[in-house]
Image (tube, rainbow, N blue to C red):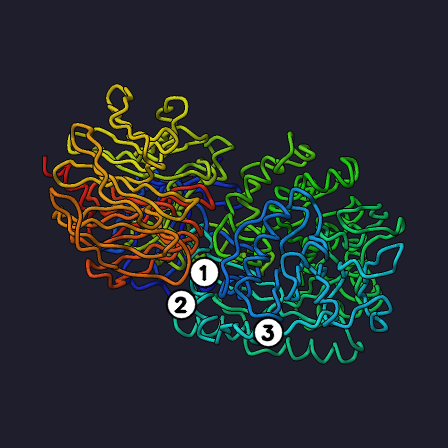
Amino acid sequence: MKFLTLFVFLTSALCSQAWPQEVSDRVFVDGNVVTVDENFSVAEAFVVRNGRFALVGTEEEATEFAAEGAEKVDLQGATVIPGLIDTHVHSTSAAMYEFENRVPSFETVKDVLAYIKQRADAAEEGDWITMSQVFITRLEERRFPTREEMDRVAPKNPVLFRTGPDAAVNSLALELSGIDKDYQPPEGSSTRVERDPETGEPTGIIRSHGGVVKVTPSRKSIGADFEDRVEGMKKLLADYNRVGLTGLADRNVSDSSIRIYQTLKDRGELTCRSYLYHGLSNRGELEDLKKKIDKIATHPLREKDDMLWVRGIKIFLDGGMLTGSAYMKEPWGLSESYGIVDPEYRGVRYVEPDKLYEMAKYALSKDMQFTAHAVGDAGVETLVNAYSRIAENDFPIRDHRPCVTHCNFMSLDAIDKMAKYGIVADLQPAWLWLDGSTLTHHFGDERLTWFQPYKTLFEKGVVVGGGSDHMQKLGGVRSVNPYNPFLGMWIALTRQPKRMDGPLHPEQKITREEVLRLYTINNAFITFSEADRGSIEPGKLADFVILDRDILECPVEDVKDIRVKQTWLGGKTVFDRETPWTISSWSDKGAFTSGIEGPACDKEGNLYVVNFGEQGTIGKISPQGEAELWVKLPEGSTGNGIRFDADGQMYVADYTGHNILKIDPATKEIIVFAHEPKMHQPNDLAIGPDGTLYASDPDWKNGDGALWRISSSGEVTLLADGKGTTNGIEVSPDGKKLYVAESKQRRILSYDLSEDGISNEEILIEFEDHLLDGMRCDIDGNLYVTRHGAAKVLKLSPTGEILRTIELPGGMPSNLCFGGPDGKTLYITEVENREVLRIRVDKPGWSVSMFQAE
């Protein structure tokens, strides 16, 4: 790598006149600035002026160049990369996917059926229950839920389980849609109803189900209005910024979704530069389709704009690889998982080659970038051949940058043509990680030789970009598909699928330089914006990301766990993890088991969390965010809540051993501080100003619980029995109140606390849904409460008023604690992603004051 010194030459090529010196500059110094320029140079400083990079070079050069009075930002050696771009999202629909119902992650068909039953139990008879994009190949069984299975869990509700263009439905859904033994799809339709080979009855699996399954809205449906959709999109964009994204390409937008983008832009709330592909149905006569292309090509947002640009057109050419409908050169092969019974079946092609050629030619002639969903190798070759035909017979296409969307299954011939004619590729590494194992199981290794061949694409000179195909849920990893770009980079570096022992065709691994180009300059090129973004160079928009580690030098396994410190868009911060109420990750996702709980900080600022990597352990995360296994508990013990006393001694609720353990951090000696056989399971702990411990003790099976007091000598006293499922527990800063969360009863109780015990029970607050878990008080007595299943932490006043709702990227927060140098950092344990989250708040936790009082 070369060291870089670059200046802005103030000529008419960049601007009409020199920037006035009174403009306020920001000078960023002492950084590891990975520019991703042509030479992949690394600098140590840069200057931002008027929202663009003005100079990139050494600290001395940057300081000398900047205007007088410029603000200096010390990067303290942190790595800086260009703002990241995702070239394949469906953001407006993804933002609303969980508007009415939070959808958990599914590992098995049993999980799916449990969720359908939960929905059916809460629905009115006859209401539709719909699930979309739960890919069957990502379930352990690798199959759709059957018609009969869905009948059992939802006998009085029609059910639609959709994966891509294909679906599985139950008997009532078939009946309401008029699909029976004699049903025939409309003429010219690509719909195919799978049937029992012996009886001819529909099995419930319908290929290309659109338009034939007659879904009607639920009578209980809340229904999102336009402002709900705008607010949902705003939250999603904030989470994109949280993982370093400053740009996106939304493929398949409609006029209504464009309106959402436009509204956010008009309000100054569009925090990702948005390049839009307008969706276009392939159905209808060619002349009618040309009129639709004309309308898109004259859209008011067709003119280039740095923030919002309608520049592309997208159609669907074939089906999906995860539904067994991608258009393949060779037959798919018989498959019970995919429901394929025809040995000659090759998938689905929605557009005939001649029609595809005419549509692409007309769109490109109108200077609209054309792309098509093409997954199978036959689908990819069909599209590439259409583009090649235009280039060979009509006009050059390189400057129009025609695109292939997905192109998972490729061929060397298609790659050579793409390189020859300037056809660009939009790939999503997540498919390899999530689905490589299933595809290998079905097709075998040889047939996957050209599956996402990143190295060959780079070597041949094809511009390939990295995207996610994000279509549902909020959260960089829990989403479908995961939009965390560092996970995508790690996948392209390792080619390691889930549930598979080794990498998939490791000869197609690419380098760290190439994976960075995948999400920066290459994606900028694909979206016609490489002159303005994609690298850190003078004259370009100041979109950049500050990381918590060096992406070029850290161990390869750490790449997926890189966390963003700050994200800048046009020289302004759109994410800063130190800003109050800003959520960021503080551990690697999956670092803990599903028993992640019990966070507590010691006086040095180290964070301790139970079940690090395996049950029965405690992990330690340093103030710098470095995690390690700290201690293993005695055999038969499993920790839950943790507390420290004023002397720095640790207490752990051991729910399997019915103990309160005491650990000396200096020696890691573990003793049984208190034991009570009558405890169901000591769950969470609270500590009063005098050092007295209080333990919640739920009996989950019977839905009740107890409360215990443990003196400084280890004496255990029953405070109350026959309560609800006691879970979170906390003492007020003055030691006069005890707060108890009853999880299943969905309420928080308040008690007067004295030497004699507890009295004057009052309901502080009640909820209609979801569970309650851990709680902590700040120094003013406000109570922070985890809402397990609701993806929220609430800040309550001492009287139960909701002061603030903090929405989380994971659905199941289990506990929390205060820490940090000033006590204003809130750490939250989250079960769905098995990680620790971090939020800066306005007031310190009261328990931190025990250490500060010393």
Q: CA distance from mark 3 to mark 2?
A: 31 Å
Q: SS for tag 3?
A: loop
Query: Dot 1 corresponds to which residue?
Result: 237
> In this image, 3 relative to 512: left or right?
left
Please report whichever mark, 1 or 2, sits nearer to the chain's N-terminal start. Answer: 1
Which amino acid type corresponds to the residue marked 3 in the rendered image? Pro
Q: Report the side of 746 relative to 434 (left or right).
A: left
**Camera-side residue: 656 or 824?**
656
Q: Amino acid at mark 1?
A: Leu
Q: Position of residue 363 (x, y in %)?
A: 71, 70
Label 1–label 3 contact, CB within 8 A: no
The residue at which mark 3 appears reads as: 217
**What amino acid does circle 2 point to?**
Glu
Between residue 837 and residue 400, name the one nearer to us. Answer: 837
Which mark, by number, is residue 269? 2
Dividing the picture into quadrants, the one containing residue 108 is: top right
Report whether residue 27 is seen. no
For the residues bearing labels 3 and 2, Cβ distance under 8 angstroms? no
Task: Give the mark nearer the N terminus: 3 vs 2.
Answer: 3
Q: Nearer the viewer, mark 3 or mark 2?
A: 3
Q: Name the disc covering residue 356, or none.
A: none
Quarter containing the C terminus: top left
